[in-house]
Image: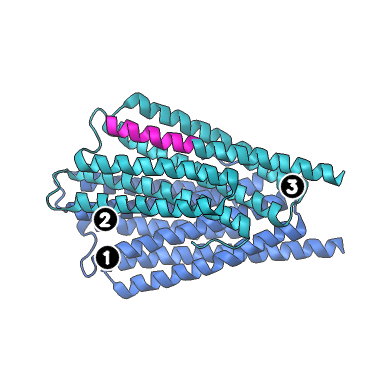
Chain colours: A blue, B cyan
Amino acid sequence: MMMHMRMKFHEQLDALTDRLALMCRLAGEAIETATDALVNADLPMAERVFDLNERIEELRGPCEEQAMALLALQAPVARDLRQVVTGVHLVTDLSRMGGLVQHVAESMRRRHPEHVASGEAEELLSRMGRVAAELAGLAERVLRTHDPELAAEIGRRDDELDDLHRRLLTLIQDPSWIGSIPAAVDITLLGRFYERFGDHTVVVGRRVIFLVTGEQLNP
Amino acid sequence: MMMHMRMKFHEQLDALTDRLALMCRLAGEAIETATDALVNADLPMAERVFDLNERIEELRGPCEEQAMALLALQAPVARDLRQVVTGVHLVTDLSRMGGLVQHVAESMRRRHPEHVASGEAEELLSRMGRVAAELAGLAERVLRTHDPELAAEIGRRDDELDDLHRRLLTLIQDPSWIGSIPAAVDITLLGRFYERFGDHTVVVGRRVIFLVTGEQLNP
């Protein structure tokens, strides 16, 4: 009987992990799509982002309920408990990633049919989008494998994103930049959305390290 | 014995709540101090913000450990379980509020001895800071009282903050605005930090509603 309970626990935990990994995959697909929408001023593509974000949000409730059920019915301890609590946190991180992507698509839609950015700024945003999508892919793999090495890799790749972000802010603040203040405002916010998206993938990685080692993550 | 265990549980839960409320109070004090630092280009005041944020971060580990201990040792169910899981989420929200305040102080320090903003933009940021500090005060009271009415009040007051934020972005994008692009970039980010701070106080309120009613919060 006890054996049966524990098997059921791990089956349910696997189901939760699958859902979290799906949320992460959708967030990655969404940031890639949002970046394409941004670079091509493509409104139907932005609409796809809203659909993807809706699917992410639809997964949130079931994940939260599943985590609560695991805590309430199974009273897990030690590593099992850490894994469920990590799941509770991850739902919030992944949902926030979806929200940030939504902001990118909204920013694009607001200026349509104009492009939000052009020239080098657009190129940098496009590169940030590519790195962000890769980060989401890494985070999905970390969720599935619990591999601390992959989690560390997220940190390194996120440094690249931060570097692109700094270059973007330097570019638009250079006296030679020919954009307007409204364009600068949009680009500043977009850069911030991508940066925060990356930060959340780092947190996903760190939470997995906590899961494996039991050591608190640093801020 | 059972009675004794439950008393101990609620004592520990109260201790966790006290710590969370303290984190929230420090976040409120920090945003008030950061806003003063910003408006007066006062560097020592910005340093005080870093100290306050450090105190917030120092509370984070003990809160997380306490929540884990409550889950592991007491295996709470129903409302008790919801309260601990809410606590797990709140640590993250409150720590993030501290992080956002830190960003405000860093932005101020980067331009020192210049003012980051001036004139009407500075006045709007100052008002945003005042509302944000009040929101943190309300959130602290919600944490202590679990009063859903106060939680709803946070939502209404946050609408005020969002309105000030919209006015700020409209102001700096108006062709008559005389600021530079670097100033616009700083002000855009500062506005975003205050807005997100407010959002987190709303989430704190919503989580308390979830605690009281057991119904999932909407995004």
Disc on res. B72: 3
Determine if residue A17 is in view.
no
Mark 2 to mark 1 CA distance (whole Å): 10 Å
The front one of B136 and A174 is B136
- Callout 2 and callout 1 share a chain: yes
What's the amino acid at mark 2?
Answer: Asp
Query: Chain ID for label 2?
Result: A
Amino acid under label 3?
Answer: Ala
Dot 2, crowdedness within 10 Å: few (<14), some or many (≥20)? many
Residue at 39% over, 32% down: B33
Q: CA distance from mark 1 to mark 3?
A: 48 Å
Residue at mark 2:
A186
Q: Which disc, if any, is residue B207?
A: none
Residue B186 is left or right of residue A29, and the answer is left
x and y percentages locating residue B84 in the rendered image = 66, 49
Tell me which amino acid carries mark 1.
Answer: Arg
Image location (x, y in percent) of residue B200: 47, 49
Q: Position of residue B208 (x, y in %)?
A: 57, 52
The lab-note entry on whether marks 3 and 2 share a chain reads: no
Badge 3 density bin: few <14, some 14–19, many ≥20, Cα 10 Å: some
Does any portion of residue A53 appear in the rendered image? yes
Q: Tag 3, which chain? A: B
Write the start and end of the magenta stretch as one range.
B26-40
Is A2 in front, or is A61? A61
Circles 2 and 1: CB atoms closer than 8 Å:
yes
User: Is residue A83 on the magenta stretch?
Assistant: no
Q: Earlier in the sequence, mark 2 or mark 1?
A: 1
Q: Quadrant of residue B119?
A: top left
Quarter-of-image position of residue A87: bottom right
Q: Is residue B125 left or right of residue A23?
A: left
Please name the residue that numbered disc 1 is placed on: A110
Local crowd size for mark 1, using a 10 Å CA cut-off: few (<14), some (14–19), many (≥20):
few
